[in-house]
Image (cartoon, rainbow, N blue to C red):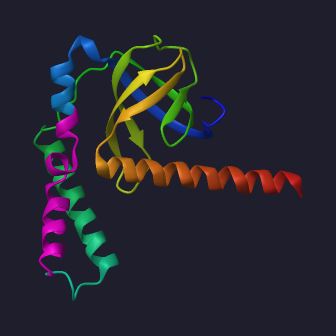
Amino acid sequence: MSDTMRLVPAPLEISFAPADEQADAYEREYQRLSETDEDPIGQWLKIAKARGETKESDPVLLHLIVELHRKVDQLTQIVKNEEPRRLELPFGGDIESIGFEYFRLKEPQLTPKTRYYGRISMPLFPKRDIGVWFDAIDDRLAKIVRLHERDEKEWSSYVTARERVMIREMKGKSL
């Protein structure tokens, strides 16, 4: 297994809990973190694009306006004290390295052969948490078993970006 697994350094944070403790509650949160529930303006934009209503729009400008709308929504939630509800996840820490299907924690915190639910803070635009289900391979290594489709694409893009950073650093050291 470790022969085919390629992990690259990545400065991410994760909160997690064994899935069997509150599996139903974790599943509800995972679904709330999906694109439809967490991002109504994004859903609206997708529908508008599908109908062809954005043909005449500048895509960069449209993206920035949507992001401004999200920020206004976020500020409104803060002012009204309507923070999105997140479950308390008892464990957490730093992710040391990532791959397309795996990640490794800095500290040993996992119980092998246990399924976990977690939230990973992604340094994307816009910055957000992604819900993830994973199985512990050993006390630090985890295999991702479930991500939302959008999150899977963004995770893969992030892994690729981190690989590029590592390659540039290696080239710089060999000069």
Q: Quadrant of the N terminus?
A: top right
Q: Quadrant of residue 122?
A: top left
The residue at the point 49 percent across, 51 percent down is 158
Q: Answer above or below: position of 53 versus 151.
A: below
How many marks the image carries: the answer is 0
The location of residue 128, given as percent across then percent down, is: 33, 45
Q: Answer above or below: position of 50 versus 152.
A: below
Q: Main secondary structure of the magenta part?
A: helix
Q: Is residue 119 on the magenta stretch?
A: no
Q: Is residue 45 on the magenta stretch?
A: yes
In the current view of this chain or complex, which residue is farthest to the bottom? 56
Horizontal side of 81 relative to 122 (left or right) equals left
The residue at the point 14 percent across, 46 percent down is 37
The residue at the point 15 percent across, 81 percent down is 52
In the current view of this chain or complex, which residue is farthest to the right? 175
Magenta stretch?
Answer: 30-52
Q: Quadrant of residue 18?
A: top left
Horizontal side of 4 relative to 88 (left or right) equals right
The location of residue 170, given as percent across then percent down, is: 78, 51
Q: Answer above or below: position of 111 versus 70.
A: above
Q: Quadrant of residue 17?
A: top left
The location of residue 7, given as percent across then percent down, is: 61, 38
Q: Quadrant of the C terminus?
A: bottom right
Horizontal side of 86 relative to 154 (left or right) equals left
The location of residue 83, given as percent across then percent down, is: 18, 37
The residue at the point 55 percent across, 14 percent down is 108
